[in-house]
Image (cartoon, grey):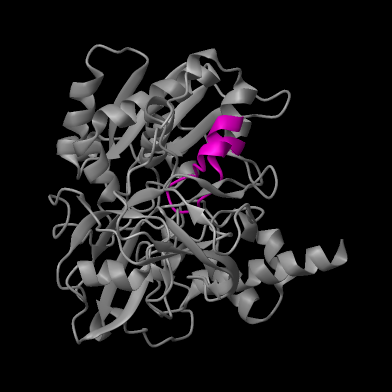
Amino acid sequence: MSIFSLAPTFRHGVHPHENKETTEHLRVERMPFVERYLLPLSQHIGAPCRPTVKNGETVRRGQVVASPGGYVSTTLHAPVTGRVTAIGARHHPNGKLVESIEIEADPYSSQRVENPTPVDWTKLSIDEFVSEVQKAGIVGMGGAAFPAHVKYKPPDGKRISRLIVNGAECEPYLTTDHRLMAERPAAVIRGTEILAAMLGVEESIIGVELNKPDAIAALRAELGSRANIRVEGLRVKYPQGAEKTLIKTLYGLEVPSGKLPLDVGILVNNVGTMAALTDYFDDGLPFIERGLTVAGPGVRRPANLMVPVGTPVREVLDHAGGLNQETRELVMGGPMMGMPLASVNVPILKGTSGLLAFTEADARIPTEYSCIRCGRCLDACPHYLNPSVLGRLAKAGRHEQMEEYFVFDCVECGACSFACPSGIPLVQLFRVAKSTLRERKAAAS
């Protein structure tokens, strides 16, 4: 019996082709600075930031340019030294016009963060620690971009006893977390230690899929004899990296419907978030850049890049050799949960894990047929929902009834759509239905 069959996993899920071979062994390279940067004030879940700078103002790299718009919000910093050239509505990757700050980089600046000041976290209370994380602008880097500090302060009566660090990176094509763990294992371990100590957790597990053996080896070598953190190899399956799925895989616990991981005493954070904590508390560097993968059959030079937040997508693609003539679709993020882009003139966000370019053959929308009741979507769903019934209700516009079938437990992983032989866009139907339900509830409140 192989090690792969013995590794922990979860029931259901799917096995899309990994397509990681073009970048999984490429070291992260630093993206050169470009002329202009665009910082949407809404690039995280929660309230938008509020500008603290004015048009024409000179800013330094790492300087605060927007303050949190509420508790579920975070700080925004200048990714470069330069001059604010505009504050106004600009196109966001989601297709909407969003209030943004435009910065023109100073071509003569060294673009170093001036006098970074480390923060001695050992002298902080949990409230002070949470405030510092918000000040650092750190968000979850697994894709959702949820302000990290919100997870670190549980409400009264709740306690975080276990920490899971997500290094699964189960989306096809994406390898930036892989390279982070292989190249900067000390930063991942250090951030895990800082967070575990502040939260007082009993155990920390770094979960990594077994298709990243060099990352697992690097982390274990860095851990040495530490007893309170361990690295667990996970069976390769999608969506292994979803937080509720990881909890089920590593602890056999099921987060109840409508509840959060906190309700079972567990916190899940991405490996990139751990490295960001290290960068801020040990080196005084706020969250102004992130790693991302540029890949797909439509890009000429696949790469793993460290990119300042706000860099235009066009500039990143140009650095990667540009697009092939056959390219027909661009996706920000992974192919399963990512966001198709309508323009290359939108910016890289804090939550951008990848840019994928697909040819017409790869991006072709399958012909949709009637549901044949085969049950493959049920076998694929990691949360034991019935996508077939939910899909029929969505098409009939019976959105309220979808709540009876737990539509809000859907994490929109896309496994059902991937498994459907009839080509039914199930996850897209669920997204529209959930959005409609939220709008109706907001209008009624």
Q: Position of residue 144 (x, y in %)?
A: 50, 53
In the rendered view, does 334 fall on the left or right side of 412?
Answer: left
Q: Position of residue 20 (x, y in %)?
A: 19, 57
In-front residue for pair 42/6:
42
Q: Give the image quarter of residue 33.
A: bottom left
In-front residue for pair 365/359:
359
Quadrant housing the C terminus:
bottom right
Res. 337 in view: no
Residue 136: in magenta span: yes
For the point 19% across and 74% down, the residue is 297
Q: Position of residue 2 (x, y in %)?
A: 14, 37
Q: Position of residue 87 (x, y in %)?
A: 58, 67
Residue 104: in magenta span: no
Res. 89 in view: yes
In the rendered view, does 332 fall on the left or right side of 129?
Answer: left
Quadrant housing the N terminus:
top left
Is the residue 101 above or below the residue 89 in the image? Answer: above
Is the residue 221 above or below the residue 42 in the image? Answer: above
Numbered range of the magenta stretch? 131-150
For the point 29% across and 45% down, the residue is 177
In-front residue for pair 343/327:
343
For the point 32% across and 52% down, the residue is 109
Count of marks, rendered view? 0
